[in-house]
Image: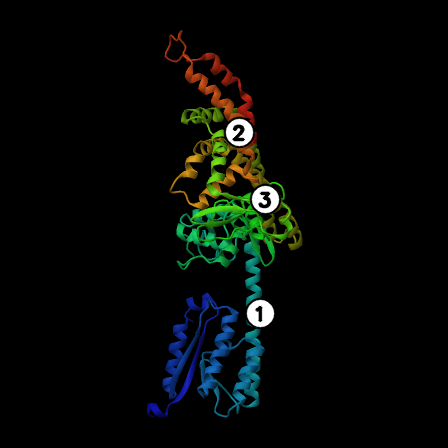
Amino acid sequence: MSMRNLIKAILYCRVSSKEQEETGYSLDAQEKLLKDYAAKNGFEIAKIFRISESASGKQIRKTFSEMLGYAEKNKISIILCEKIDRLTRNIKDAAIVSDWISGNETRQVHFVKENFILSKNTRAHENLVWDMKVAIARFYTNNLSEEVRKGQKEKLTQGWLPTKPPLGYKTIGDKGHKIHIIDEEKAPLVKKMFELYSSGNYSLNELVRVMYKEGLRNQSGRKVGKSRMHEMLSDPFYYGKIRWKGEVYQGEHQPLISKDLFDEVQKHLTRKIGSPQYKKHYPVFKAKIRCEECGAMITWTTQKGYWYGHHSPYEKYKNCTKKLYIRQEKVEEQLFPHFDKVAPKNERVLRVLEKALKESHAEEINYYQAQRQELNTQFERIQHRLEAIYEDKIDGKITADFYEKKFKEYSEEKENIINKLEKLNNTNVQYYEAGYAIHELALKAKDIYESEKATNEERRLLLSYVFSNLSLNADKIKPNYTLAFEFLAEWMPKVNKIFELTENCENKRKNRAFDPVCPVVLRDLDSNQDYLIQSQASYH
């Protein structure tokens, strides 16, 4: 028979699970089987449709419809398939195939491995076989789905996500024992994404741009889009939880961020107004200053290359008497003295303060260590209880309902312990680091702001660290410090004065190398424990 006289046929290949690919039922194996069958029976292959194990139900239905549509459009009457359960596993699709068959006497579906041909002239008992096999295939699908759900539930109960982890984590382990650990390459970028967005200085669009520039990429090596980034910022997996089908489970994986940071990000994600909108040449003081009289937000526009702030034009603010224009440089001139007010006099003051912060908390460190030890003991005890009830469930010593009840109880207790440990560790390990960082930022704040390399986003972030809010009265700026910098504004002038006196004082009676130059002043400084105590309270 010449190629011109061959009957055209469609090949339909499908695998439904990874196990089938690994046990010889791969797409390639099916395709070879169907090609051999076509060659032996005089069919010319018009098109091959393949559905892999990773395809979703939606994609399977789409390909199935495309296949029948292609056959209809190109007047192809033969479809070759390995088995009935490769073509359809539900009554709806089976009915569609039956309708397609009934539309033309020449249409046939060949199920090669089952040696069965479905056509309009198929006898009654063969149609019964078709219906029965469709029903069996449907049962197989439903049963498989049920087993998958049971496996997922068991995985969640053990504290592990039953699917691929989000960006920032990777999967390790053998089949059936896979777990998720932090991806050392991508995790720092994901953490930075959360930290930047929590500042309130970035819209999602701007965050996408910044994080792409920083090197954040998705699993395919492409840019993480706005909607995907929103999903990541909303995913509790990053602080140790697993959200699955509307329920939240305690995870066993290592958290990437703290619960406090996650909660702060959610506040910005759900806000309705005041969200920062990125624009080219973004103004430093946009959404930073309000009118002291009426509370209107000062709006910023450019004129001849300079930024000018002016009163809101909205009708409700029309009676305000403080309407005027103020240039950005004028605002900065008024803020710089407030930077100086909270700054240590020099690096020497900073180093002494760092040493004092560490030494003043020696007893507190011991207290924290004792607390941590007790919490670790409680954690181990609750972990043993969780393992014990799991073994009892496996051995049939307790009912599933009792297991679920105790598992929930113990998991909540475990979560409370973990939260306490996390807060304790942050306090114990980072208290002096935070204190030093605030002093160092205060020392360098003005230089950072005036640096030619500083971006407007960085300047805005600096302003949010130092000032809780700014108000404008006529052409006068009134800043309010954040809690930490309010404390520095009270104490740093006193500390700087003590060090200034120390530098100007000379101990003429100095006999030994380590005698203080000005003992009276240094005693005043050493006795000033209030500074260190209140400093600690401020950082916490």
Q: Nearer the viewer, residue 485 or 244?
A: 485
Which amino acid type corresponds to the residue marked 2 in the rendered image? Ala
* Structural distance between the alpha carbons of marks 2 and 1: 68 Å
Nearer-N-terminus badge (2/1): 1
Taking the spot 60% from the left edge, 40% from the top edge, the residue there is 292
Image quarter of residue 10:
bottom left
Q: Nearer the viewer, residue 515 or 16?
A: 515
User: Which class describes the residues within 10 Å of circle 3: few (<14), some (14-19), or many (20+)?
Assistant: some
Q: Specify the quadrant that holds the C terminus.
A: top right
Badge 3 marks a residue whose secondary structure is helix
Q: How is the image coloured?
A: rainbow
Badge 2 marks a residue whose secondary structure is helix
Location of mark 2 (residue)? 489
Q: Are marks 3 and 1 in contact (CB under 8 Å)?
A: no
Nearer-N-terminus badge (3/1): 1
Q: Which mark is residue 142?
A: 1
Q: Which mark is residue 415?
A: 3
Q: Are marks 3 and 2 in contact (CB under 8 Å)?
A: no
